[in-house]
Amino acid sequence: NAGVTQTPKFQVLKTGQSMTLQCAQDMNHEYMSWYRQDPGMGLRLIHYSVGAGITDQGEVPNGYNVSRSTTEDFPLRLLSAAPSQTSVYFCASSYSGQGSLEQYFGPGTRLTVT
Amino acid sequence: AQKITQTQPGMFVQEKEAVTLDCTYDTSDQSYGLFWYKQPSSGEMIFLIYQGSYDEQNATEGRYSLNFQKARKSANLVISASQLGDSAMYFCAMRFPQGGGGADGLTFGKGTHLIIQP
């Protein structure tokens, strides 16, 4: 199993550009989520999904959209990038949101918005 | 709202000594889970140990143990016989319910930067 994969690993955007961060898992996990990590901070939850077709907002959802059309994929879209979105983004998955023992994290995407 | 506090921004420890990383949490929920993750300089998040709020025994995983004191709302990580490879950021996190769908998210502390010295 590849686990949780994220692409790209690095990305530089100009203010106002749009892009999609890709996340895929091959463990048949129902629950997937996106976090951002800023310097000196822990990870903060952006959006999450409990299954295909179901998504909801986390702590810091503004400026991000998500969709979940398949169990495997959970892309994160930035519609109009802003410098405040410069961060490292982590995707995570687990068997079930409730009662899960562990969330498996992808390797992260380092995004810089100039 | 749930909150995780890690009061040690950085720690220096001699190799082979035991290390205790502090974590306190605040929640009004009775059912929750506590996690510790390690983040080395390469950036990935590595799961170390988990403690459920109803678990009576402290969790252990190899050299890692979790000192869970529910009444004090603390969940300290203990690393026995530290090694140079233990140098990393360590994050305490709590699982909490999200919305009404029964899903969970993780709330993270700000982390402790642990440096093991030879």
Image (cartoon, rainbow, N blue to C red):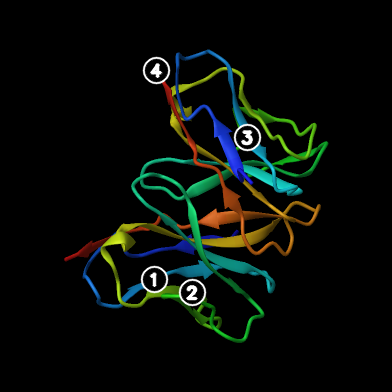
Please say if the residues under marks 4 and 1 sit with CB atoms less than 8 Å apart: no
Q: Amino acid at mark 2?
A: Ala
Q: Establish whether labels 2 and 3 are both on one chain.
A: no
Looking at the image, residue A94 lies above or below residue B59: above
Disc 1: which residue: B22
Q: Amino acid at mark 3?
A: Cys
x then y, percent, for residue B99: 75, 51
Q: Secondary structure at mark 3?
A: strand
Residue occupying image coordinates x 56% and y 55%: B107
**Left or right: B17 in relation to A105:** left
x then y, percent, for residue B81: 30, 77
Q: Which quadrant of the figure contains the N terminus of chain B?
A: bottom right
Mark positioned earlier in the residue sequence (1 or 2): 1
Q: How many marks?
A: 4
Q: Establish whether labels 4 and 1 are both on one chain.
A: no
**Marks 2 and 4, how far apart in space?**
40 Å
Q: Chain of mark 3?
A: A
Residue occupying image coordinates x 47% and y 30%: A9
Disc 2: which residue: B75
**Left or right: B63 in relation to B57:** left
Q: Callout 2: few (<14), some (14-19), or many (20+) C-alpha neighbours within 10 Å?
A: many
Disc 4: which residue: A114
Q: Amino acid at mark 4?
A: Thr
Residue furthest out toward the bottom:
B56
Of marks 1 and 3, the one in the foreground = 3
**Marks 1 and 3, how far apart in space?**
32 Å
Residue occupying image coordinates x 65% and y 44%: A33
**Marks 1 and 2, how far apart in space?**
7 Å
Q: Callout 3: few (<14), some (14-19), or many (20+) C-alpha neighbours within 10 Å?
A: many
Q: Secondary structure at mark 2?
A: strand
* Residue A23: image tag: 3
Of marks 2 and 3, the one in the foreground = 3
